[in-house]
């Protein structure tokens, strides 16, 4: 048995799974500190289906801890950005496009140093050790605890980033280091931004990892703990301490993976209607389609692995208002305060949940408290919601071909059985817990994404090498070797670079090894 947990803006969902069977499910209100809500969810599972804590082989969690920290600007460490690229790259220094508020929170310390490579691995300028020692002295004096090291074309050669880290940590021993070649993709500014965000979260990641471990240990669960990543795969707790940025979009990704699992479809759209937002994404080979361009995180452009998801502020907790020209649903939501503020719970705020109860689509709270709602208002709100969702599905299409849609999430009761432009609308069993199920059944992955100089006569050899490297990374991350498969290979010729340069991406996934997984030490 293993446990899957997904923390949303309104609810924390948990499922107890044995093989491919869902034994128990529990939905609790998300708490301000998140961890308390996780504890309550596990207690709810125990109440629904008694189990021996020692029988749990793994716990998988999708959490909003880290993305919330960036959005709210709290719990972030003082961070320095060290870029290796001089004499190039002086025109646009680190933090150049950051919102002032977020830059001030983490200190905005930036340094330009010599180094970097051309696309083909040629050195721009040698690393200057004295220059880096001066940087180390300055960041130590400023009390900086975390550093993001970026280098021009470090995806081709990351040696300079690693050498710079050795020099900095020799001078400042407790410094936490994040490398751009391990986090972002092509595009220096976006890759650097993603690395800075990761570095700012490193201390918080340590605290959250310890907190999650303690909360499960207190309930007698000593199984390995994994966090969901943006691409639908898992990472262990030690990896999460180093790469917290990889969890940012785990919520929508878990829902899409859960939708694929519950429906049995690998190629479809998934609509996840939660308490705060509705997320629409496309599945390819059972995994979310990845965003091809940069992704904005709290006003900062980044380019690390993120699913291609359209989110709209529409969910069970969305506030409903009557306007002269019609109705407005969201984008603001009462969130985890739904049980205090919604009309059906004795509150004074009209929400989408109240509309669902009044229309007979849901049976929660006290229906008598909404029995006098205007029928025309109820119908208008439901029509508005249907139109909004149809628009989002249309925006995600890549062809006019008939599209199957899997509907999941606790707020999915708001969606009618027919949506314009959708050929087949599937509402599978356990759909309200698809996010937690997606976490519980997640696999382990490995990815290669870098620039290769490809000789026309050796193209197949280079692609095979990239595939094998992705497989090796998946196995190293904890996948069972005989279960690993390649789910994506992409080759993009880079016409603007001289020679036969191509960007090659290969991704492999496999089942997690549970039998031999190392168990966490007992407290």
Image (cartoon, rainbow, N blue to C red):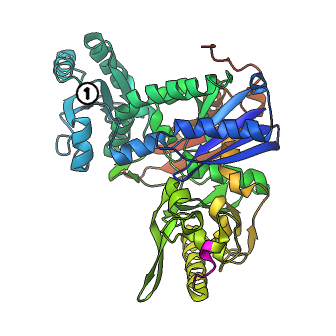
Image-quadrant location for residue 153 = top left
The quarter of the picture where residue 436 lies is: top right
Give coordinates of residue 104: x percent, y percent: 21, 41
Magenta run includes residue 325: no
Q: Please name whichever residue, 254 or 209, is drawn nearer the observer in this view of the structure.
A: 209
Residue 185 visible at all: no
**Direction from residue 431 to residue 275 in the image, left or right:** left
Q: Which part of the image, by quadrant, shows the C terminus?
A: top right
The image shows residue 156 at horizontal and vertical percentages of 42, 33
Q: Is residue 273 placed above or below 239 in the rendered structure?
A: below
Q: In this view of the protein, which residue sits in the foreground, 169 or 77?
A: 77
For residue 418, say whether it is visible. Answer: yes
Q: In percent of the image, x 65 and y 67: which residue is there?
A: 366
Asked if residue 222 lies left or right of residue 69, the reply is right
Q: Is residue 391 left or right of residue 499?
A: right
Q: Is residue 371 magenta?
A: yes
Q: Which residue is mark 1?
A: 115
State the predominant SS element of the stretch in magenta: loop
What are the residue bounds of the magenta stretch? Answer: 369-373
Task: Tell me what residue is drawn at x 17 percent, y 17 percent.
Answer: 137
Residue drawn at point x = 32 percent, y = 53 percent: 299
The residue nearer to you, when weighing 197 against 224, is: 224
Could you say where residue 35 lies in the image, as x and y percent from the top left?
53, 36
Task: Tell me if residue 398 comes above or below residue 482 in the rendering.
Answer: below
Label 1 SS: loop
| Quadrant location of the N terminus in the rendered image | top right
Q: Quadrant of residue 91?
A: top left
């Amino acid at each position: 048995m293993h446990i899957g947990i997904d923390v949303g803006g309104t609810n924390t969902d948990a499922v107890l799974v044995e093989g491919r069977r869902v034994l128990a499910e529990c939905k609790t209100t998300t708490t301000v500190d998140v961890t308390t809500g996780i504890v309550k969810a596990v207690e709810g599972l125990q109440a629904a289906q008694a189990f021996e804590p020692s029988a749990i082989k793994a716990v998988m969690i999708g959490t909003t801890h880290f993305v919330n920290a960036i959005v709210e600007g709290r719990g972030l460490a003082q961070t320095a950005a060290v870029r290796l690229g001089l004499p190039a790259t002086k025109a646009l220094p680190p933090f150049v496009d950051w919102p002032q508020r977020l830059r001030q929170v983490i200190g905005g310390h930036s340094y330009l140093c010599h180094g970097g490579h051309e696309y083909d691995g040629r050195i721009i300028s040698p690393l200057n050790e004295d220059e880096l020692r001066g940087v180390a002295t300055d960041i130590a004096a400023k009390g900086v605890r975390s550093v993001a090291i970026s280098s021009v074309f470090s995806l081709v050669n990351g040696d300079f980033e690693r050498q710079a880290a050795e020099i900095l940590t020799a001078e400042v021993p407790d410094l936490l280091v994040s490398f751009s070649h391990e986090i972002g993709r092509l595009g220096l500014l976006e890759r650097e931004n993603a690395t800075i965000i990761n570095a700012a979260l490193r201390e918080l990641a340590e605290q959250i990892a310890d907190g999650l471990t303690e909360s499960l240990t207190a309930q007698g669960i000593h199984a390995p703990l994994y966090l969901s990543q943006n691409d639908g795969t898992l990472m262990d707790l030690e990896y999460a301490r180093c790469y917290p940025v990889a969890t940012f979009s785990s919520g929508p990704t878990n829902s899409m993976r859960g939708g694929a699992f519950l429906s049995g479809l690998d190629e479809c759209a998934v609509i996840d209607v939660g308490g705060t937002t509705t997320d629409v994404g496309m599945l390819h080979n059972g995994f979310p389609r990845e965003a091809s361009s940069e992704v904005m995180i709290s006003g900062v452009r980044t380019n690390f692995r993120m699913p291609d998801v359209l989110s709209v502020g529409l969910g069970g907790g969305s506030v409903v208002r009557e306007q002269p020209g019609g109705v407005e649903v969201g984008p603001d939501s009462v969130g985890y305060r739904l049980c205090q503020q919604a009309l059906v719970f004795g509150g004074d705020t009209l929400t989408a949940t109240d509309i669902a109860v009044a229309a007979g689509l849901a049976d929660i709270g006290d229906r008598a408290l909404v029995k006098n709602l205007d029928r025309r208002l109820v119908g208008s709100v439901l029509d508005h919601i249907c139109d909004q969702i149809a628009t989002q599905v249309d925006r995600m299409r890549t062809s006019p071909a008939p599209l199957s849609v899997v509907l999941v999430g606790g707020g999915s009761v708001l969606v009618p059985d027919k949506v314009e432009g959708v050929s087949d609308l599937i509402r599978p069993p356990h759909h309200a817990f698809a996010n937690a199920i997606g976490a519980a059944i997640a696999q382990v992955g490995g990815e290669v994404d870098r620039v290769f100089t490809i000789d026309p006569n050796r193209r197949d050899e280079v692609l095979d090498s990239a595939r094998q490297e992705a497989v090796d990374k998946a196995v190293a991350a904890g996948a069972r070797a005989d279960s690993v498969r390649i789910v994506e290979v992409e080759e993009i010729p880079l016409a603007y670079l001289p020679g036969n340069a191509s960007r090659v991406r290969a991704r492999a996934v496999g089942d997690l090894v549970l039998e031999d997984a190392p168990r966490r030490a007992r407290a």
